[in-house]
Image (tube, helix red, strand yellow):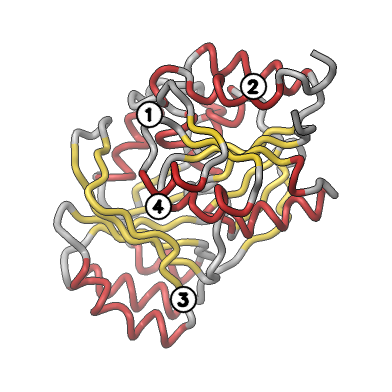
Amino acid sequence: MEKISLIALDIGGTLLADNNTITEENITAIHNAKCKGILIALATAREYSSTKYISKLIECDYGVFSNGSHLLDLNELKTLKCSLIKTKAVLELYDYCKKNNLYIHLNQEFREVSNQMKYFNLKHHLLNKGYPDDLKSECYLVDDLRNYIINNDITKIVIVSENELDSVLDEIRPILEKYGLYITEYNKNLNEHLINKIINYIEIGASMETKASGLLELSKTLNIPNDEILVFGDGDNDLEMLSEFSNSVCMSNGTQKAKKLAKYITKKDNNNSGVAEGINYFTRTNGGD
C-alpha cells in the first residue's frame, strides 16, 4: 500500500449522508487516520462559513473551499489563498438577478449572505438548528444586498433556480467575459433533500480553479508528494481531483464519469460509510497496521 499523508474529502454525496449527517463509522475511520499522523482536508465547492460544524466534527486540518479558490489552515484559521470578485462585477450580476427574479447567494471568506430565505440560505438556517452556537453556519439574510455588496468583499456568486439555467448562462456570459469571471460549477437537477427541492445552480468565481488545482497548491505548501494524497469524491466537480491524484476513491453513488477516473470505487454509498471503506482500504498498512 502507498504511504498516505493527507486525505482530501468532498462533502455532499461523499462525506455526508443524504440527511446531512456523518456516520459514526466515517468519523471513527477519519479519527484513526489522524492517529496515524494523516492530515485531513475538506475539498468542496462550499465555503468555510457553512462547514464549521463538519470541520470540527472530523477535526479537519485544512480546507480547499470554493472549488479551490480559497485555501484555509483550519487549525490556525489562517488564509493561505483567497480570490475576490470585483465589486462592479458582483453588482452587475446582482442587478441581473433582481431584474429576472433569480435567487443570488454571495460567499465571503467567513460568511454567506442572500436577501431571500430560500434555497441555500434556508438550508443553512435549518441545519443551524442542530449546531452549537459557536459552530453555526454564518449565513445571513440581508435586506439591502446591493449596499452590502458595495461594502464587502465577495469570493463567489451562486445563482439558483428550480428552472433550467441554460438561458441565464447565455445571458450573463458577456458580464463574465467583461470582468474575467469563470463558471466554476454548473449543477443541474440537484436534489436538496433538506429543503425538499430539485434545484439548478451556477457558481461564479474570479479564477478558473478546481478542487485539484487548489489541492495541488496546498500539497506544495505542505511539501506533501501527490502520491501521498488520497482523494474522495462522487460528482462531476470532483473529476479533475480524481484524475490528478493516483490514490482516488469514488463513492458507489457517484456519477459514471467519476467512477471511470477513480482508482477505487466503494461498495458502500455515502449513506452507508463509503468514506470509511475507502480510508480503510488505502490506510490499512499505513503507520504499521
Residue under the point 76% across and 40% down: 228
SS state under label 1: helix
Specify the amino acid type for callout 1: Leu
Q: Residues within 10 Å of mark 4 (few under 14, many from 20)?
A: many
Tell me the crowding category of disc 1: few under 14, some 14 to 19, or many 20 or more residues within 10 angstroms, Cα based: some
Residue at numbered disc 1:
127
In whole angstroms, how far apart are the C-alphas of marks 2 and 1?
A: 22 Å
Mark 3 — residue?
181
- The spot of residue 136 in percent (x, y) is 49, 31
Residue that badge 4 annotates: 113
Q: Residues within 10 Å of mark 2 (few under 14, many from 20)?
A: many
User: Which comes sooner in the sequence, label 3 or label 1?
Assistant: 1
> Could you say where residue 166 lies in the image, as x and y percent from the top left?
21, 68
The first of marks 4 and 2 along the sequence is 2
Q: Which mark is nearer the camera, 1 or 4?
A: 1
Q: Can you tell which quarter of the image residue 240 is in?
A: bottom right
Q: Quadrant of residue 97?
A: bottom left
Q: Is residue 41 left or right of residue 118?
A: right
Are the two marked residues, 4 and 2, in contact with CB atoms closer than 8 angstroms? no
In terms of depth relative to the viewer, which is nearer, 37 or 124? 37
Give the mark nearest the N terminus, 1 or 4.
4
CB of mark 3 within 8 Å of CB of mark 2?
A: no
Residue on which the image places disc 2: 30
- Which three-letter amino acid code belongs to the residue tagged 2? Ile
Q: Amino acid at mark 3?
A: Leu
Q: Is residue 285 left or right of residue 130?
A: right
The residue drawn where x is 24% and y is 39% is 191
Position of 48 relative to 285 (above/below) = below
Determine the CA span between mark 4 and mark 2: 31 Å
